Amino acid sequence: MRARLLAAAAVLALGLGIAFTPAHGDATDQLSVYSGRAIATPIGLVSRVPAESAGGIVYSEARLEIGKTRAIAAGETAGELGEAFLITSIQGYTNPTLVNAQYPPSNVYPAEATAPNSVDSGGVSAGHFHAVADGTPSAAADATGGAGEIPNVLHMGGGTSRGHTQVRADGTVVTTAVSTVHDVRIGPGAAPALTIGTMTSSAEVEIPLGQKPKTSLSVQLGGVLVAGTPVTITQDGVTVGSTAAVPASSVLAVNQALAQLDAQGISVRAVPVDKQATDSEATVSGAALQLRYTVPPTVQLPTDIGKDETILLGQVSANATGRPRQPLTFGIPPVEVAPLLVAPEVGAGEPASALAPAPAVVEPAPPPVAVAPSQTGAAPFTLPHRTRNVVADRVLSGYRLVVLAAVIAAAAYAIRNRTRLPE
């Protein structure tokens, strides 16, 4: 009898532990709002389908918000809108290099994913696309790709991208995006008009708890040549370097090469840095170069994607939001008492209508008024801990309560049968 009661109590304690174990992996309760998003790609593609869809080649994206984190990596993607368009427009379309990770995981998106065709052996990566998300919370994606090209428009020898966003234990929200690429050639494959040796872009937003955001963005280009002549790319366009004397023939060759690109519908422009910040949110984005090209009407494509695209070389973007919790306060407005006027005594020879200010009148002290906690510097109450608004957690909690009720009923039934007197 005692053994059965002890067993029932153990099962009951186990059920209580299962049912009321707190959830782990959420950000600190000191934050009321947080989010982050990082995008990095050596070759960013903005397609029009007709709405714009942002994707890229060797693409990485990481993003988080309250209750959910997600990471995306791909060898090439037309963006979420573009991928949906391709799936519905081309029968049997799949993207084998596209992987998605999500936390909490689902039947569609696991917490960690790697492209099945990734090649990573002996320290050499010909292609690697990996995404991971967890509940710390953080999300990270990285992509490594080999040579790729858009025929007669753009060629790259190889590139990498990495996106990462997280909420640290001290409440700091950090978002970082980095992309690198080498051996970039723009124009016809046999005789490219513009070549770039190396290109690296990085963007970061950091918001310490209760402090203003910190942002940074850097773009570095090396070995930029137009028709074999070193040039400098600025917001005003492409200019021939001024550090050394350049013969007139080289300047003419540069102008002819740029005119050749314009004739093919390819325009080369520098990309200005876009930076926006408030007390609790910041966004910074940029790229090394912007190319815009339009496919001639004589060229037939299976879909509208690719006919009119903007290419951003070395594209990076970082966004973060971190807003600390603020206690609610209440104030009591001051009470104003108007001065009193009294009539003086009427004496002989004085008009009865004469009025004079009353002498100082001592009013009785008002009853003591309770002082609001906010006036003493203390919060009137503390906010409860933030709970995760995740459907999966609710279903699991409900299941735990059902198991607990069943365990209690079974224990009560067993005790009743053992203690009931025989009839």
Image: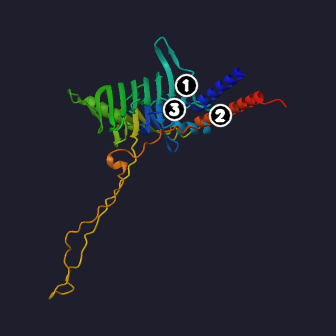
Instruction: Tell me the CA gap for discs 2 and 3.
Output: 39 Å
Picture layout, residue 215 above or below residue 357: above
Disc nearest the viewer among 2 and 3: 2
Regarding mark 1 in the picture, which secondary structure is present there?
Answer: strand
Q: Quadrant of the C terminus?
A: top right
Q: What residue type is labelled 3?
A: Thr
Amino acid at circle 2: Tyr
Quadrant into which the N terminus falls: top right
Which residue is tagged 1?
113
What's under tag 1, amino acid-wise?
Ala
Q: Is residue 108 left or right of residue 40?
A: right
Residue corresponding to mark 2: 399
For marks 3 and 1, give the CA distance: 16 Å
Local packing at callout 3 (Cα closer than 10 Å; few below 14, some 14-19, many 20+) is many
Q: Helix, strand or loop at disc 3?
A: strand
In this rendering, is residue 126 above or below 306?
Answer: above
- What mark, if any, has residue 27 been given in the picture? none
Q: Coloured how?
A: rainbow
> Residue 337, image x and y in percent?
29, 66
Percent across and percent down for residue 363 are: 27, 66
* Residue at the (27%, 69%) spot, across then down: 338
- The residue sitting at 33% across, 49% down in the picture is 375
Residue 396 position, x and y percent, is: 62, 33
Question: Measuring 69% from the left and 24% from the top, which residue is drawn there?
Answer: 5
Looking at this view, is 384 or 102 the one in front? 384
Q: The residue tagged with tag 2: helix, strand or loop?
A: helix
Q: Mark 3 points at which residue?
A: 77
Q: Work out whether mark 1 precedes mark 2 in sequence or the reverse, and give the earlier one.
A: 1
Image x and y of residue 277, in percent: 34, 42
Neighbourhood count class around disc 1 (C-alpha, 10 Å): few under 14, some 14–19, many 20 upward: many
